[in-house]
Image (cartoon, coloured by chain):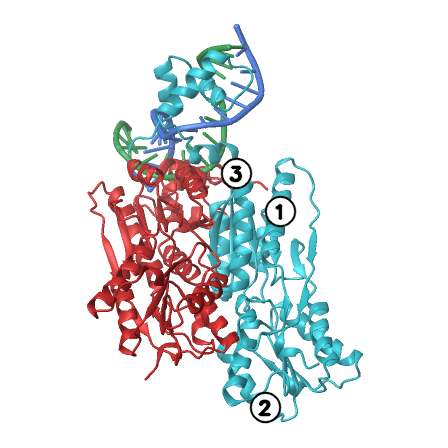
Chain colours: A cyan, B red, C green, D blue
DNA sequence: CTGAAAGCGCTTACAG
DNA sequence: CTGAAAGCGCTTACAG
C-alpha cells in the first residue's frame, strides 16, 4: 500500500515540504491557518512519518536492545517486563534477544545490535561468558550500555545489581539461626559473578559462626535446572548423612531438592532446612513453601532502563557520563522450608 | 564516535561509492582485486552498514513486532522464545510489547508498530479486546499479520491455533471416564475466543454423555490468577457439596484450586478430580501433580513466525497471499490430580 | 511566516 | 569492470 509522505501533503496544499514538516512538529513559526490545514489533511490521509527517514536524519532509532540468557525464566521475564514497560513510557521500543547461556550466540547478538544501531544495550551475561571482547566493543563504539544481574565487574559500565554476597550471607545466617550445623551449598556455574558472590557469602557466614568450611559440601550446577536439584539432593544425602541445611543458588533448583525430599520422605525443615534465591512464583505455592531471597526483578528492569536513558540523553547533549551502579535491596522471605523453630 | 561510511572507504581507496557498495555486497561485476581491497579496509575500519539508510532505501527493517498480553506467563514466554529464535535464524529481530490485557494499551501499541514500520506483526489479543478497528488498520495498510492463541475469528489473517473445543472436550471426557458425575468449569473471561471455545468443549462433552448442563457450575475468571483459583475452589465446595470434578481454564488457576484443597484437606482426585490447561512447568512438580492439556507453545511461536515470513516474502515479490490457518495438536497429560482409577 | 537547498548513507538502473 | 546520478523521506540552518 502507498504510504502518505510530506511531499504529497505539500503538493495537495500547494505549500512547501518544509512548512508541512514544521506544522506537524508544531514549530512556532507557522501560521495557525497553515498549521490547521496541514494537521487535518495529515489526519485524513493517515499520515505517519517514515521512521526510516527520521532515523537516518536524527541518527537515533528510539529503540534499545536487550540480551538475556533465557526468556522462559521467572526472574528474567519479570525484568523484561520492567524494561519494556519503562521503555514504552519513555517512547522507546525494545528488541529482545536470548543468548541461551551461550557465549557464541551472545557475541553474535551484540554484533547484530551494533549493526542495527540501537540507541543503547541492556544485558545480562550468559553463564559461559568469560571473554569481554564483544562487550568492550560496545563501549568503544560509545553505545550506552547497562549491565544487570550477571555482570562483568571489570567492565566500566553502569550496572544494576543486588548485593549477592550480603544476601547469601543472610540466607545462610538464617539457616544457622534455625540451628543448622552442617550446611551444604548448591552453587551456580563457575563464571557468573553472582554465583561466585553467593558462594563467598555462604563461606563468610560459616566463618563468622565458626563453622569450618568443607568444599565437599559444595555442589556446582552446570545448567541450573530442576533436575539438578533432584540429583544433587540425592547426592547430598548419600554422601553426607548429617547435613541439616542447604542453601541453593536459585529457587528452580531448590524446588527440585524439595521435590526429591518429598518423594523419599525426608522432612523439611525438620531434618533438612532449605533456602533458595530469587522468590520465584512457584516457591510460595509449593509444599512445603520455600524460603528464599526476594530479588526485585521488575524494579531491576526499570532501574536498568532508567540508567540507560540517562546515558542516552547525556550522549545526545554531549555531556560526559560517569557509569553508575545501582544496588537494589533484597529481603529474606522465610517460609516453611527453613522454619525449624 | 564517528562511524565509518562507504564514502570514507571510497575516498581512502580512490574509487567510487558505487563500487565500494557493490564490492561489499559481493556483486559479480567487481574485480577481485578491488573487492579484496574494499573488504579488507572495511574490516580494518570496523565498517558496518548504516541500517537507517538501508531501511530507507530498501523499505524494510528486518524487524517484526510482537504484542502479547503478558510476558510473565509460562505459555507466553515460551511463545516469545520460539518467535525470537526463529526470527533470528531468518535474519529478523523482534520488538516486544505487552498489552497487559488492556485494549487501550493494545491499540496504542499497534499504532506504535505501524508507525515504526515493522515488516510484520504477530499478536495475541488481550482479554479486553472486543473491538477490531486497530486490527483492521493493520490489514488495510497491508502489513503482514499473524494471530495466535487469543485470536479474532472474523479477522481474515493467518492464524496459529489449537482446537480449543476439541481439547476441552477431551479433558472433560477424561474426567467423565474417571467416573466424575458432576463437573464444574472455571472458565476464562468473556471475550477471548479460546475461553469461549473451551467452554463450548466442556458443554459438548457433558451433552455427549447425557449429563445435564448447569450454568451454576460455571465460574468466570476476571483476571485468570492463582488467587481466583483459591476463591472459586472455596465457592464451588460451598455451593455444591457434590461436585466431583473441575475443568479449569488454565494451570495457574488450577494450581490455586489444588492449593486450597490441600489446605482444607479435600482429597484430589479421590473427592474431586481436577484438570487444567496449558501444561505449565509447575504442574508437573506440584503435589498432587496436575493433569492438563499440553499446548505446544514453543512450536506455536515458530509456526507464527514462519507464517509471517511467508507473507512478508510474498509481499516483497508482489505475489498474492491467502491467509493460512495452522492448527497444532494438543495432548492430554494425565497426572495425579485426575486419576481416580 | 514561508521555502529552497543541503544532507543523512545507502542502493541500483544506467552509461560508458 | 567502474562510476555519476537519482532518489528513499525526512530535518533544519539559512535566506527572504
- B53 or A52: which is nearer to us? A52
Question: Residue at 68% of width from left, 70% of height from top?
Answer: A197
Q: Do discs 3 and 1 share a chain?
A: yes
Image coordinates of residue A20 in percent, x first then y, are 44, 19
Q: Chain of mark 2?
A: A
Element assignment for label 2: helix
Query: CB under 8 Å between callouts 3 and 1?
Result: no
Q: Residues within 10 Å of mark 2 (few under 14, many from 20)?
A: some
How far, Cα to Cα, is label 2 from label 1? Answer: 46 Å
Q: Which residue is mark 3?
A: A60
Q: Is residue B218 above or below residue A47?
A: below
Q: Quadrant of residue A43?
A: top left
N-term-proximal mark, 3 vs 1: 3
Q: Do discs 3 and 2 share a chain?
A: yes
Comparing marks 3 and 2, which lies closer to the viewer? Answer: 2
Q: Do discs 2 and 1 share a chain?
A: yes
How far, Cα to Cα, is label 3 from label 2? Answer: 57 Å
Comparing marks 2 and 1, which lies closer to the viewer? Answer: 2
Q: Which residue is mark 2?
A: A237
- A67 or B197: which is nearer to us? B197
Comparing marks 3 and 1, which lies closer to the viewer? Answer: 1
Q: Chain of mark 1?
A: A
Would residue B90 be found to the left or right of residue A124 on screen? Answer: left
Q: Is residue A236 above or below residue A95?
A: below
Q: Quadrant of the C terminus of chain A?
A: bottom right
Which labelled disc corresponds to residue A306? 1
Q: Is residue A202 above or below residue D10?
A: below
N-term-proximal mark, 2 vs 1: 2
Query: CB under 8 Å between callouts 3 and 2?
Result: no
Amino acid at each position: 500500500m502507498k504510504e502518505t509522505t510530506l511531499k504529497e501533503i505539500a503538493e495537495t496544499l500547494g505549500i512547501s515540504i518544509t512548512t508541512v514538516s514544521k506544522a506537524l512538529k508544531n514549530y512556532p513559526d507557522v501560521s495557525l491557518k497553515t498549521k490547521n490545514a496541514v494537521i487535518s489533511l495529515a489526519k485524513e490521509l493517515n499520515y505517519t512519518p517514515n521512521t526510516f527517514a527520521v532515523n537516518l536524519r536524527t541518527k537515533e532509532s528510539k529503540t534499545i536492545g536487550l540480551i538475556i540468557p533465557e526468556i522462559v525464566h521467572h526472574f528474567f521475564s519479570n525484568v523484561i517486563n520492567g524494561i519494556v514497560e519503562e521503555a514504552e513510557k519513555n517512547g522507546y521500543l525494545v528488541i529482545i534477544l536470548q543468548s541461551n547461556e551461550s557465549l557464541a550466540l551472545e557475541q553474535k547478538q551484540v554484533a547484530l545490535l551494533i549493526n542495527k544501531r540501537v540507541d543503547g544495550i541492556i544485558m545480562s551475561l550468559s553463564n559461559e561468558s568469560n571473554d569481554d571482547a564483544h562487550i568492550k566493543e560496545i563501549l568503544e563504539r560509545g553505545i550506552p550500555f547497562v549491565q544487570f544481574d550477571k555482570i562483568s565487574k571489570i567492565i566500566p559500565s553502569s550496572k544494576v545489581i543486588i548485593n549477592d554476597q550480603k544476601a547469601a550471607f543472610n540466607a545462610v545466617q538464617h539457616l544457622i539461626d534455625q540451628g543448622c550445623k552442617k550446611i551444604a551449598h548448591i552453587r551456580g556455574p563457575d563464571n557468573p559473578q553472582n554465583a561466585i558472590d553467593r558462594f563467598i557469602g555462604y563461606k563468610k557466614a560459616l566463618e563468622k559462626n565458626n563453622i569450618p568450611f568443607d568444599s565437599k559440601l559444595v555442589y556446582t550446577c552446570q545448567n541450573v535446572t530442576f533436575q539438578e536439584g533432584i540429583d544433587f539432593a540425592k547426592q547430598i544425602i548419600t554422601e553426607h548423612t548429617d547435613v541439616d541445611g542447604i542453601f541453593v543458588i536459585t529457587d528452580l533448583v531448590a524446588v527440585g531438592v524439595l521435590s526429591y525430599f518429598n518423594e523419599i520422605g525426608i522432612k523439611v525443615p525438620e531434618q533438612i532446612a532449605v533456602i533458595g534465591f530469587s522468590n520465584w512464583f512457584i516457591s510460595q505455592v509449593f509444599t512445603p513453601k520455600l524460603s528464599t531471597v526476594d530479588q526485585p526483578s521488575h524494579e531491576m528492569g526499570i532501574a536498568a532502563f532508567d540508567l540507560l536513558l540517562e546515558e542516552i540523553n547525556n550522549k545526545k547533549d554531549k555531556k560526559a557520563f560517569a557509569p553508575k551502579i545501582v544496588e537494589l535491596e533484597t529481603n529474606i522471605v522465610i517460609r516453611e522450608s527453613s522454619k525449624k523453630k
